[in-house]
Image (tube, helix red, strand yellow):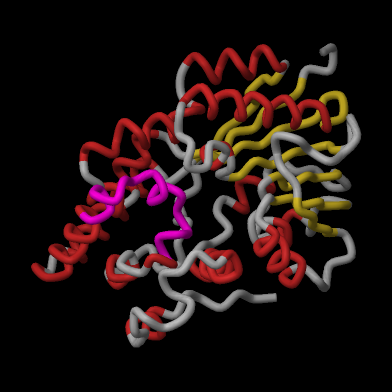
């Protein structure tokens, strides 16, 4: 079932007071996420999936990866805490007899031990803290998620994690360049979760060994090369598709909006997008990591 692209012209014609823009309705947010975002790193992820695998897409969102996983796997199960996104995933994959979806949390998976050959966590770990970005809470939930992935994996199972590095955020995401400096320490405490000794030690403790990593060249966003994407960031609905905006204070959000209006006013939006395209070419937007679970643990 092909997905419709995010309609820029439709957005540009909307009045800010119309329904569907700027509210916090879960259905609206899920729909806008599904329209604005692309399934990222499909080819690279499928490189770690074997024919006949039982696959858990943990934090599946609107099921964008599940359709492709189902082409190789014998069974794909997707879970997400957002019931609206699960509803879209079910509709998106309703023609598949080997894909199913349910509401659930990656920190408390509703499955028996040893149920899956592969678990996918695609851009999930940095969401675990929600609006609570205190590192202790976030790291604790990350450890729970990795522990749950281990529990539901069969002996010698595989874990695939898609995550964005600090350098990728700074080079390949145009909107991060418009965030005030005061927000960066907060952002790094969330997105840098998988970088450094803490995460390496966690994976070793859990019995995971990295077997490969690859950085896709594409973008998460459908209009990633279009300067009109800058204008879309004035829409709170579009901003709801990126958890980074939830980490900004009201004052920082106001500064961001002012920066967007400034680059739209002085004609530098195209330059901003071109910089992000160059950053994506050199650093990528995210990296796909594959781990094997040691069979003797």
Residue found at the very far left of the displayed protein: 266
Write the residue at 52% across / 16% down: 198
Question: Total marks drawn?
Answer: 0
Residue 139 x, y percent position in the rendering: 55, 24
Residue at figure coordinates x 15%, y 63% from the top left? 263
Look at 21% across and 38% down and name the residue there. Answer: 181
Residue 107, position as x, y percentages in the image: 70, 34
Please state, as top left, top right, bottom left or bottom right, where the C terminus lies in the image. Answer: top right
- Is residue 48 rendered to the left or right of residue 183? right
- Relative image position of residue 92 (x, y in whole percent): 72, 70
Left-right relation of 60 to 128:
right
Residue drawn at x 66%, y 47% is 59
User: From what the image shows, is residue 15 above or below residue 272?
Assistant: below
Q: Give the range drawn in magenta.
A: 238-254
Place of residue 165 in the rendered image (x, y in percent of width and height, measured from the top left): 42, 35
Magenta stretch: includes residue 245: yes
Q: In the image, is residue 150 part of the stretch drawn in magenta?
A: no
Q: Nearer the viewer, residue 49 or 237?
A: 237
Q: Main secondary structure of the magenta part?
A: helix
Q: For residue 61, which quarter of the picture?
A: bottom right
Which quadrant of the figure contains the N terminus?
bottom right
Q: Is residue 2 above or below residue 210?
A: below
Q: Give whichever of 174, 79 is nearer the camera.
A: 79
| Left or right, 71 with reference to 41 | right
208 or 215, nearer to the observer: 208
In the picture shown, does residue 28 fall above or below 196? Answer: below
């Amino acid at each position: 079932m092909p997905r419709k692209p995010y309609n820029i012209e439709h957005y540009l014609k909307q009045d800010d007071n119309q329904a569907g823009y700027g509210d916090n309705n879960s259905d609206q947010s899920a729909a806008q996420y599904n329209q604005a975002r692309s399934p990222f790193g499909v080819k690279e992820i499928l490189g770690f999936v074997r024919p006949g695998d039982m696959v858990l897409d943990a934090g599946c969102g609107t099921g964008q990866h599940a359709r492709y996983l189902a082409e190789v796997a014998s069974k794909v199960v997707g879970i997400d805490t957002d019931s609206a996104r699960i509803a879209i995933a079910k509709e998106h994959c309703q023609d598949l007899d080997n894909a199913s979806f349910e509401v659930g949390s990656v920190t408390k998976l509703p499955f028996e031990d040893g149920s899956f050959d592969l678990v996918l966590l695609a851009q999930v770990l940095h969401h675990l803290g929600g609006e609570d970005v205190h590192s202790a809470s976030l790291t604790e939930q990350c450890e729970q998620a990795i522990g749950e992935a281990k529990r539901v994996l069969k002996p010698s199972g595989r874990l695939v994690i898609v995550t964005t590095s600090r350098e990728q955020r700074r080079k390949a995401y145009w909107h991060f360049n418009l965030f005030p400096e005061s927000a960066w320490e907060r952002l790094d405490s969330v997105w840098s979760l998988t970088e450094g000794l803490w995460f390496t030690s966690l994976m070793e403790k859990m019995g995971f060994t990295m077997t490969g990593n690859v950085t896709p060249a594409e973008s998460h966003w459908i209009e990633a090369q279009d300067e009109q994407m800058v204008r879309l960031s004035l829409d709170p609905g579009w901003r709801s598709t990126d958890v980074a905006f939830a980490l900004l204070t009201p004052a920082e959000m106001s500064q961001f909006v002012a920066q967007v209006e400034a680059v739209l006013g002085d004609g530098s939006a195209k330059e901003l997008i071109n910089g992000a395209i160059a950053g994506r070419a050199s650093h990528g937007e995210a990296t796909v990591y594959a781990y094997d679970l040691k069979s003797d643990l």
